[in-house]
Image: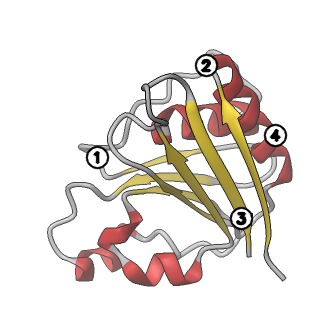
Amino acid sequence: MPSTISRFLPDDAATSALGAELADSLVPGDLVILNGDLGAGKTALARAIIRTLGNDATMDVPSPTFALVQPYDSTKAPILHADLYRLGDPREIDELGLLDNPAAIVLVEWSERAPELVDAATVVVDLAIPAGGEGRSVSVTRR
């Protein structure tokens, strides 16, 4: 049975705190979908998750927009951070190897470009900028 939490994140510190909380709850094999418009905080949340899993608050975590996939190591599991915004065709997803390692924790931005990933997700994070533009609204569903 899916479980969902919803909250308001007033600032970047709250987004980072949620990322740390999510990182602690992730297990090897989790596929995390990060949904939201441009600027909603998908990459900021992914950075916080990766830094927590990597046990390094200052780790350089670039956006994978141009590389499409950035790999990271952690003591919990290998991590893959993908940004599918530039994916030309959903069939290209197989070439990225996102599901090749069943022990990896995979974070995916712009997943709507690869519907099979959405179907396989174990955690779905929906981020939105509320009216007025301050903070972020977030809901996290574990399937």
Residue 85: percent from left, percent from top:
26, 55
Determine which quarter of the picture holds residue 19: top right
Label 1 CA crowd tier, 10 Å (few <14, some 14–19, many 20+): few
Q: Earlier in the sequence, mark 3 or mark 1?
A: 1
Front: mark 4 or 3: 3
Nearer the observer: mark 3 or 1; the answer is 3
The total number of labels drawn is 4
- Amino acid bearing label 4: Glu
Measured in 3D between alpha carbons, the distance from the residue under mark 4 to the one under mark 2, in whole angstroms, is 16 Å
Give the label on residue 141, or none. Answer: 3
Please determine whether, in this image, residue 5 is positioned above or below residue 117: above
**What's the residue type where badge 1 is placed?**
Ala
Left or right: residue 13 versus residue 112 is: right
The residues tagged by marks 3 and 1 sit, at their Cα atoms, a distance apart of 28 Å
Label 2 vs 1, first from the N-terminus = 2
Circle 2: element type: loop
User: Who is closer to the viewer here, 113 or 137?
Assistant: 137
Determine which quarter of the picture holds residue 111: bottom left
Pointer 2 or 3: first along the chain = 2
Residue 78: x percent and y percent?
65, 54
Mark 4 residue element: helix
Q: Residue at position x 61%, y 52% from top?
A: 79
Name the side, left or right, on which 112 lies relative to 103: left
The Cα atoms of the two marked residues, 4 and 1, are separated by 27 Å
